[in-house]
Image: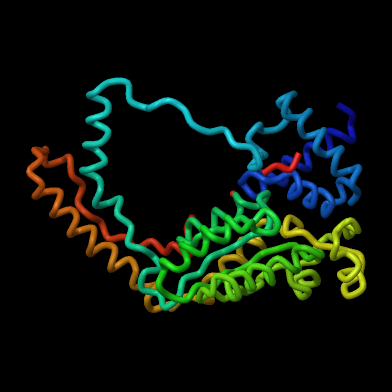
Amino acid sequence: MTEREQKIVNAAKVAYETYGTQLSLRQIFYRLVASRAIDKTESQYKGLSALLEKARKLRLIDSSMMEDRTRKYLAGDDPFETAEQHYRGWRRAFLDCANLYKYPRWKDQPEVVQVWCEKQALERLFSSVCVRLKVRLGVCKGYPSFTFLQEANRTIRAEGKPVTILYFGDWDPSGLDIDRHIAEEFGDFFRSNVTVERISITEEQIEEYELISAPAKKSDARANGFIAEHGDEVYELAAFEPDDMTAIIEEAVMEHVDKSIWDDHSRRQNEFRKEILEMVKGSGLTVEEDEIEEIEDDDEDESEGEEEDEE
């Protein structure tokens, strides 16, 4: 490995260690462009992909630094080998069920929020926030298919209250049009009580966060109109610093929250946990005194607690 290649690998390691989470190839590319480790060209992007593969094979970087979410590795065998293992596992789950109970975070809110992201490569980052805030995440992977929208519509109708979709897409010919498409499908075809709100990328964010641009893809059917209105530079969600994007997602979600209801969540959850504990104790199952843990008040503020590789 050349001295220049080693410097690039070291810069990639710094990016990974800074954020403490797996990054997509595109995210690493933008981090290295920002630090001037590489140039903002397509050839440098392809070269980075090959170099990071080489570095992983040589064990120069953590093999878990990157993740490929476009390919799936599924299924497997059952976990329990014996009848006793199976019984003890499910017995423990039953005895712990009170502390495992979670009161629905959005049940009492006047509306429900969903977060939709254009890029599958950012699924891990978006998921880390959405899991914590108990928000459904839709990963569109470009324009969402009709099948995807049908499934989403069934979920939205089941909510029984207004739903706001917070949309995050690239600043490019398609990324600026996808939220319009989503809004029209829910409004004109499904006629559901849905509002689509574009959160990112906006023109103001491009300047505020000093995003690194990329050339517009002129093969896109909307490219001419986009270039005429906005110029020939596009901006991708992956260009955001991960911490900045995390903050933008959380702020957008919390703007739709009734704070008094949100703050009352822990009290409601603890009340139900205590009820469940009494049900466990009265179930008739013979247990030792130290097998059931008493309920401790859950004061966790989930708004402050607790994520593809395009090679």
> Could you say where residue 154 lies in the image, as x and y percent from the top left?
47, 62
**Which quadrant is home to the C terminus?**
top right
Return the residue found at the far top.
Answer: 82
Residue shown at the point (36%, 73%) measured from the top left: 108
Asked if residue 300 shows in the view, the reply is: yes
> Could you say where residue 77 lies in the image, as x and y percent from the top left?
42, 25
In this view of the protein, which residue sits in the foreground, 98 or 75?
Answer: 75
Asked if residue 251 shows in the view, the reply is: no
Residue shown at the point (87%, 50%) measured from the top left: 36
Residue shown at the point (70%, 65%) measured from the top left: 178
Q: Quadrant of residue 171?
A: bottom right
> Could you say where residue 155 lies in the image, as x and y percent from the top left?
46, 62
**Which quadrant is home to the N terminus?**
top right
Looking at the rendered structure, the number of numbered marks drawn on it comes to 0
Q: Quadrant of residue 81?
A: top left
In this view of the protein, which residue sits in the foreground, 306 or 193?
Answer: 193
Colour option used: rainbow
In this view of the protein, which residue sits in the foreground, 89 or 180?
Answer: 180
Q: Is residue 224 left or right of residue 98?
A: right
Q: Quadrant of residue 284?
A: top left
Return the residue found at the far front.
Answer: 189
Q: Is residue 85 left or right of residue 196?
A: left
Q: Is residue 75 above or below residue 113?
A: above
